[in-house]
Image (spheres, helix red, strand yellow):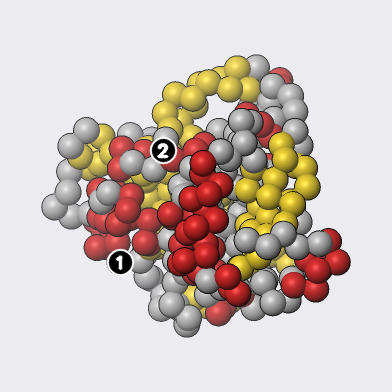
């Protein structure tokens, strides 16, 4: 690899638009550096990538790899899964897990509000032939905000159960400045060690949603299925009995928590929010895959809905 000077790095940014910032291990890269050099030269080609120092992020030094295409960057990260991504990575399909609420570096919020009006009986009917226990109590329809309780469908041994959980998975400890943890509402980077522990089928869930909002100047733009009555679920992950301080006044509490995946936007969402949208599943086969398949298969569902699948709609009425 050829180290680029700072001026050259700025010039090359247009030629190499995909930037991957990698944390330097405490003991350095060692032999992994040689393996990485050789892999890049033989698999990507010397004219298709570049690198230079990535400065310092927090207490960690970084190196910056630049690629012409997202596929090349993804292939590199797949070939070297032990590489630790750092804040500032500009790879399509990646949002830093080290910023609160799963927000990308510019603090651009991704779907932190949705509406849920599907009745409990209707949810059970969607899974006919599958044993499901309703432990959610009374589920009131309406808007769902971060840190609120909302229904999810998760595993219960060999069956499914409908329960309420609190929106916001545990934050990476490195981002917490105080004991309080407000939670992470959406997850993009499935290669992060923080999230990998919860990617197995036992921790996956479906989050029922009727419509969701993306922020715009002065408010929110809402999205719903283009074909009315299409059932939708966010592809979620969950953890049970997690002890943390969500609100200082409440002290430590033990909660069942959830969040859902995000991905690149489809055409409708991109017109409003060009960086991301929730991972939405509308096909019963995809629901089963997300709940039961190995992550190597299930992770392929982390993709946008087809263009035309969503419609821009007015905000839902407030619950009476």
**Quadrant of residue 3 in the image?**
bottom right
Residue lying at 75% horizontally and 33% vertically, measured from the top left: 59
Number of dots carrying numbers? 2
Above or below: residue 11 compared with residue 209: below
Residue lying at 73% horizontally and 76% vertically, measured from the top left: 14
Q: Is residue 255 left or right of residue 85?
A: left
Q: Residue 247, position in %: x, y?
A: 67, 26
Mark 1, secondary structure of its residue: loop
**Quadrant of residue 284 in the image?**
bottom left
Counting residues from the N terminus, which is met first, the one under dot 1 or under dot 2?
2
The quarter in which the N terminus is drawn is bottom right
Q: How crowded is the residue under tag 2: few (<14 C-alpha within 10 Å), some, or many (20+)?
A: some
**Where is mark 2, residue-wise?**
198
Q: Residue 208, position in %: x, y?
A: 41, 54
Q: Residue 186, position in %: x, y?
A: 55, 49
Above or below: residue 233 compared with residue 56: below
Say which of 224 and 43 sits in front: 43
Labelled disc at residue 63: none
**Where is mark 1, residue-wise?**
283
Q: Is residue 30 left or right of residue 134?
A: right
């Amino acid at each position: 690899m050829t180290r680029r000077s700072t001026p050259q790095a700025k010039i090359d940014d247009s030629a190499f638009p995909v930037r991957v910032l990698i944390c330097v291990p405490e003991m350095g890269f060692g032999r992994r550096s040689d393996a990485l050099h050789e892999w890049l030269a033989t698999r990507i080609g010397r004219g298709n990538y570049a690198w230079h120092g990535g400065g310092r992020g927090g207490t960690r030094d970084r190196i910056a790899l630049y690629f012409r295409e997202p596929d090349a960057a993804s292939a590199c990260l797949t070939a070297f899964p032990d590489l630790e991504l750092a804040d500032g990575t500009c790879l399509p399909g990646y949002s830093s897990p080290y910023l609160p609420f799963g927000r990308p570096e510019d603090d651009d919020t991704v779907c932190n509000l949705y509406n849920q009006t599907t009745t409990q009986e209707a949810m059970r009917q969607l899974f006919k032939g599958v044993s499901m226990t309703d432990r959610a109590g009374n589920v009131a329809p309406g808007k769902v905000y971060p840190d609120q309780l909302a229904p999810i469908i998760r595993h219960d041994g060999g069956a499914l159960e409908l329960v309420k959980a609190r929106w916001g998975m545990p934050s990476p400890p490195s981002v917490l400045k105080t004991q309080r943890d407000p939670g992470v509402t959406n997850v993009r980077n499935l290669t992060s060690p923080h999230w990998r522990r919860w990617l197995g089928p036992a921790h996956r869930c479906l989050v029922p949603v009727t419509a969701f909002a993306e922020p715009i100047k002065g408010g929110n733009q809402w999205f719903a299925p283009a074909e009315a009555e299409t059932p939708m679920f966010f592809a979620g992950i969950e953890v049970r009995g997690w002890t943390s301080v969500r609100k200082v006044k409440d002290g430590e509490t033990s909660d069942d928590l959830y969040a859902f995946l995000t991905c690149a936007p489809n055409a409708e969402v991109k017109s409003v929010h060009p960086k991301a949208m929730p991972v939405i599943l509308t096909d019963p086969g995809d629901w089963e895959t997300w709940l039961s398949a190995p992550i190597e298969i299930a992770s392929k569902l982390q993709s946008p809905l087809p263009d035309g699948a969503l419609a821009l709609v007015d905000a839902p009425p407030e619950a009476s």
